[in-house]
Amino acid sequence: MLELSQYSLIGGLILVALALLCYILVLTLGRSVRRAPVMAHAGGSSGGSADSEAGRGAEGDGTSTGVGAAQPRTMAVYGTYLTRLALVFLTACLVLRTIAVGHGPFTNQYEFSVAFAWGTVAAYVYFEYRYHVRTIALLVLPIAAGMLLYALSVGATANPLVPALQNNLLLTIHVAVAIVAYGAFSISFAAAVLYLTQPEEGRPGWPKLELLDEIGYRAVIIGFPLLTLTVVLGAVWAEIAWGSYWSWDPKETASLLTWLIYGAYLHARVARGWVGRRAAWLLVVGFASVLLTFFGNLFFSGLHSYAK
Amino acid sequence: MSQDVRERPTESDTHQSLDGLDGGPAVAASDVTERIWRFFTSMRTGLWLILALGVLSLIGTLLEQTPAGLSADPAAYASWLASIHSKYGGWTPVFDKLGFFAVFTSIWFKAIMVLLTTSVLACSVNRAPRLWKLAFHPHTKMGETFFTHAPLGASVVVPAEPDETMDYVAEVLKSHRFRTVTDPQDGEVNLYADRFRWGPFGTVVAHLSFVIILVGFFLSATTGFKNTGLVVPVGSTVQIGNGTGMSVKAVSFNDAYYKDGSPSDYASDLILYKNGAQIQRQTIRVNHPMKAGGVWFYQSFFGEAAAVKVTDGAGKTLYDDAAALQFQSKDGKHSIGKFDIKSKGLTVYVVDVASGETDPNLKAGQLQLEIDQAGKSEPVATQVVDQGAPEKIAGLTYTFERTRQYTGLIVAHDPGAPFVWVGSTLLVLGLFMVFFFPHRRMWVRIRKTSGGSEVLCASTIKRDLAFKPQFHQIISDIQLAAVPSDTTDGAGRNDA
């Protein structure tokens, strides 16, 4: 069962890499054929909601192009399906491992990393489905691939649960919620980077600044309540297992830092002088903090230092 | 019949705040009070305070923090500082001066917390009335320019009288779970519809819950008690103290391991007494604490204890208990315990070889006793004793009976915790309210035209793009409802 899980992981990694390749090809091939035909559609005034949604998606995307651009379009569709298939493989990897070890697969760096990659890919699949923006894949999929490679490097050994982790319910919920939040934050990070690397007036063929801003925000309003829930569930567990709800453990303070940065972002987005680029910078810093929180176990000692 | 749907970029959206906590009414900064008020109600003040708190958290994450309880002991603190000197070098005294090794109790942290709490409260007080008005006394009638300039707008011409049109427009909106408020005037009808009007209150809930959590933290730090090292040798009964009148007896302790040597279970069978009477018995484990009268007992650590019996010349027992070997000698080779014989003013140190170590002078089954008299700098006696063999040392008889295990407990009573849980629950609820139930508002104007009525709809969508498809669905539902159909009773509406 563990072996099968490992194969699923490798399959997922290969699929993520292939999907990334597709999206890169879309971007490079798509440069020569701009999306003029799509504009007429997006500007159309006979307003069915589905039409305008699709129009907006195509307009903001720059990867799906009109007549004479069959190649990039096909590539983009391949990219979409490969990513979804990768999600299936990673889900299988986690499910098989859960069955094999008998608890949520969230107890060591290997399992965390696979779960992080899963969260990232899942968030991407959702946001692509919802907003039709594939360009963010160029940043999101490397994060997922990096996490999977890291997982492979640390090895898949399954250790038995030490007493502190023997709380199946809280272990599963606390980490699962964190993983979804981190996935959402990786989307907002990707959107922010695409936002910041464009000039004020935008860049032809790239998603519009306005849409990237919106995606960054959408991802945070999913991620932030879930991060809050993660910290609260962590506090609940800490009170049961460690004797107090908050101990200023390095992982706790790092998650507090992450929480504060995204909290700052939510306020920045409505504060004068902070809308736009500064808010986008906060998303970049926020994701750096997510990574610090995630890898914190390796650098700091503390209560969270379980199996490494 | 015609329909015209229009969308504008969100920049042109009329000002509608996410949570009603941003952008205040212009207050003339004529005097100091107003200036202060404006400072604390400013979104940017809050933002900078959050970021400052973030910087402190970053410092607290990256730099090692003083272990709890150490700062009260200057000598221990100095040696701790020395131990981290290799890590931070010349920066050590600088960081120490700045309070960076105890960031979360530093003056910086406290000051920012006070400012932030003030800001949160001021913003909530400032905005709550406006949220109330938006929810319960909304503008039901908008100006003509709103309908032409709103980011979402549509107009539908239908062959029905305004009154009648209003009825089914209201019905369509109700079917989309909107609340409707109508305001008929001569020749035209104004209709306001909204959904989730309670959503924005989530922001007040979330902000106030943050304050409740801080109150909890404050109470946790200032009230209750926490003993992180209550040592109970198996078979012994130990007082909890702290005014609880409780004592706890360890009936047994068990540690179990997996095949690979990593621990699988630590369990202590405890009996709890209050004022001498048993009130509870429970086996506690990591993740399974015992709770009694607001006091929590956690399994924390364990080790060896030495059972020693001390009698005087007349055979009277002065001490008969186990001393936990819970301390380590500096070189780590010995584990040390101690007990007092109060009536004689003696402190007895019990020394054993630490597990995995060897000492030629202290064999298995042996124990070294060091007996100190209060007020004397040199020990009265230091002697190695064999298990089961009574030894007369300095006028008293000491018997090392056997080694037993001890269990180490955390005992805590935290009156702040309930505040933290109430605050946390409200925080999560508040956030879900704000983000997943955005206040959706729509204004409708129905005007009489020559052939029937014109329905104008407009809405704001700032930070709520998800509303767009629903808006369009509502418009097409209005349009459908206006079309007479042979098979529905809607035909009756087509008299005009």
Image (tube, helix red, strand yellow):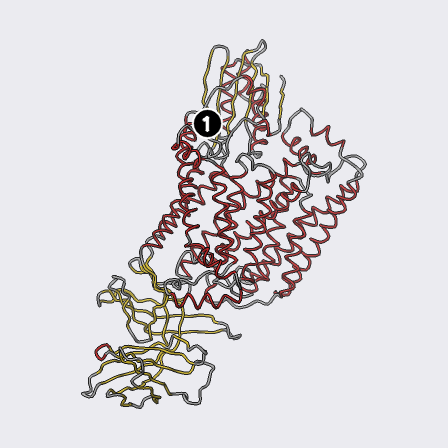
Q: In the image, what residue occupies the spot 38% across and 47% down? A: B422
Query: On screen, B430 above or below B134?
Result: below
Horizontal and vertical percent position of residue A118: 61, 53
Camera sees residue A174: yes
Q: Mark 1 lies on which chain?
A: B
Q: In this view, does B362 lie to the left or right of B54?
A: left
Q: Nearer the viewer, residue B417 or A45?
A: B417
With respect to residue B246, does B471 lie above or below?
above
Q: Where is residue B293 in the image (x, y as percent from the top left)?
A: 28, 58
Three-letter amino acid code of the residue under disc 1: Ala
Query: How many numbered markers are drawn?
Result: 1
What residue sits 62% from the left and 65% below the top? A154
Label 1, secondary structure: give it: loop
Q: Quadrant of the C terminus of chain B?
A: top right
Q: Quadrant of residue A235?
A: bottom left
Name which quarter of the figure residue B73 lies in: bottom left
Residue carrying label 1: B26
User: Residue A27: percent from the left, percent from the top?
Assistant: 75, 43
Query: Could you tell whether A71 is left or right of B31 in the image?
Result: right
Q: Quick one: which residue is furthest to the left in this view? A: B314
